[in-house]
């Protein structure tokens, strides 16, 4: 069993000032009323062009982001690497709508792939399909019974071409790339395109990874089907497992539109499917590659135990553990210290453009039971250890 209580290892890369900043941030994030007010105040200030960028950059941005550009992330990349942890550069801008912006984002994602080429400090690249496409086209294409107009079909073709360009660059540079999961009403479109990319680029190894959100009650069955398809086509299936990021939105939409919720009935069911998916993948690892994106200690322990049982070395590159920058360092650093492959998602981008991501992080920390409390207790433990307080 790996101990996640060793705060000396978990926070070795953090100065006492870093810990103090993190302590107060998580104290604020742990208060839903303050988070709600903070979101309103921050958005208002940014929209009014008030000079708050410096404050944001020194606080929440500094905790959860690597910088505004790829080169700005160098310090974070090197710091993580010093402790055996890789970086996943995540260009975290949202809400773009023009083809010009979509194409510019494609080029930025390809820049992250080129930064990772031959660089062991950056084992993966990642992108969201909605960052390079129109949401409405993805939504309409999701329903196979709907007919796209000529113009809509041309837009869908352009989306596929952008995804193909990114995946081709990943294949050419031998850099695996994650395609992030999104809302259920566009996910079928993303799943179909992603599998087509796997057919094209995953013949020798897993280059293209699909992302499965296990807070959905249908994803374990979907994974089983995908494994069967991958074996039929003799390709390597890359998969990133996460619990998910759109739960409240999904439930609200299902209730409003009168269809059954796609969300698991409770956290226990979600955890059970997540851990069953880990077992299924390890059983089929000869044809797969896994990134377990989780802040759950039990799941990390289960995956480590499954690897041990199957004789899979901790350093086997087919299995990675991943967490977000600024969160769950007790998992990341202790797993890496034990010799496992670990990477941190390192979001970056202009402060104003990254704010939707940062505010979502704050929301998720507020809503996930025990997450903020666990972070705070570990930070306090390490602060006391450094002060010599038992």
Image (tube, rainbow, N blue to C red):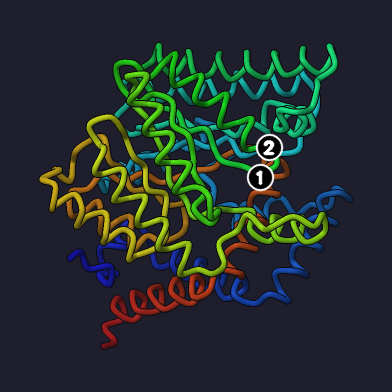
Q: Residue at x 61, y 21 (%)?
A: 106
* Residue situated furthest front in the rendering: 145
Image quarter where the C terminus lies is bottom left
- In the figure, 289 relative to 206: above or below? below
Residue 386 locus on image (x, y percent) = 30, 76
Q: Residue at x 70, y 69 (%)?
A: 35
Q: Is residue 220 visible?
A: yes
Q: Quadrant of residue 252?
A: bottom right
Give the total of numbered labels. 2
Alpha carbons under labels 1 and 2: distance apart? 6 Å
Q: Quadrant of residue 199?
A: top left
- In the figure, 38 relative to 279: above or below? below
Q: Residue at x 25, y 37 (%)?
A: 285
Circle 2 packing at 10 Å, graded few (<14), some (14-19), many (20+), is many
Residue 326 locus on image (x, y percent) = 47, 57
Q: Secondary structure at mark 1?
A: loop
Q: Is residue 63 visible?
A: no
Q: Is residue 290 left or right of residue 35?
A: left
Residue 329 locus on image (x, y percent) = 37, 60
Residue placed most toward the observer, 267 or 95:
267
Residue 68 locus on image (x, y percent) = 60, 38
**Which residue position is annotated with label 1?**
183
Image quarter where the N terminus lies is bottom left
Q: Residue at x 68, y 33 (%)?
A: 130
Q: Is residue 5 left or right of residue 221?
A: left
Q: Is residue 307 left or right of residue 273?
A: left
Residue placed most toward the observer, 348 or 136:
136
Circle 1 packing at 10 Å, graded few (<14), some (14-19), many (20+), is some
**Which residue position is annotated with label 2?**
186
Q: Secondary structure at mark 2?
A: helix
Q: State yes or no: discs 1 and 2 in contact (Cβ < 8 Å).
A: yes
């Amino acid at each position: 069993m790996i101990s996640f209580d060793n705060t000396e290892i978990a926070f070795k890369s953090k100065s006492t000032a870093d810990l103090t900043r993190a302590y107060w941030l998580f104290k604020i994030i742990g208060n839903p009323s303050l988070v709600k007010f903070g979101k309103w105040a921050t958005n208002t200030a940014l929209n009014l062009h008030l000079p708050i960028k410096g404050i944001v950059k020194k606080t929440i941005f500094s905790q959860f982001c690597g910088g505004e550009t790829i080169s700005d992330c160098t310090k974070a990349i090197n710091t993580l690497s010093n402790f055996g942890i890789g970086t996943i550069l995540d260009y975290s801008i949202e809400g773009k709508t023009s083809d010009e912006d979509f194409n510019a984002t494609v080029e930025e994602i390809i820049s992250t792939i080129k930064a990772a080429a031959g660089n062991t400090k950056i084992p993966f690249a990642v992108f969201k399909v909605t960052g390079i496409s129109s949401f409405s086209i993805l939504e309409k294409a999701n329903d196979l019974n709907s007919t796209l107009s000529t113009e809509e079909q041309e837009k869908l073709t352009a989306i596929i071409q952008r995804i193909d360009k990114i995946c081709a660059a990943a294949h050419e540079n031998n850099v695996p790339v994650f395609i992030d999961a999104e809302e259920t009403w566009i996910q079928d479109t993303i799943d179909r395109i992603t599998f087509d990319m796997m057919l094209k680029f995953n013949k020798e190894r897993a280059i293209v990874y699909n992302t499965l959100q296990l807070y959905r009650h249908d994803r374990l069955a979907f994974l089983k089907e995908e494994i069967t398809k991958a074996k039929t086509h003799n390709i390597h299936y890359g998969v990133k497992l996460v619990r998910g990021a759109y739960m409240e939105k999904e439930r609200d939409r299902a209730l409003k539109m009168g269809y059954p919720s796609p969300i698991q009935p409770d956290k226990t069911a979600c955890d059970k499917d997540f851990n069953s998916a880990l077992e299924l993948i390890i059983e089929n690892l000869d044809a797969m590659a896994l990134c377990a994106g989780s802040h759950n200690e039990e799941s990390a322990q289960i995956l480590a135990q499954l690897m041990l049982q199957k004789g899979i070395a901790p350093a086997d590159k087919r299995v990675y553990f991943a967490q977000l920058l600024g969160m769950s360092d007790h998992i990341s650093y202790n797993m890496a210290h034990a010799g496992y492959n670990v990477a941190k998602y390192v979001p970056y981008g202009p402060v104003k453009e990254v704010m939707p991501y940062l505010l979502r992080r704050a929301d998720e920390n507020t809503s996930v039971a025990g997450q903020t409390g666990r972070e705070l207790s570990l930070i306090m433990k390490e602060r006391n250890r450094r002060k010599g307080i038992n």
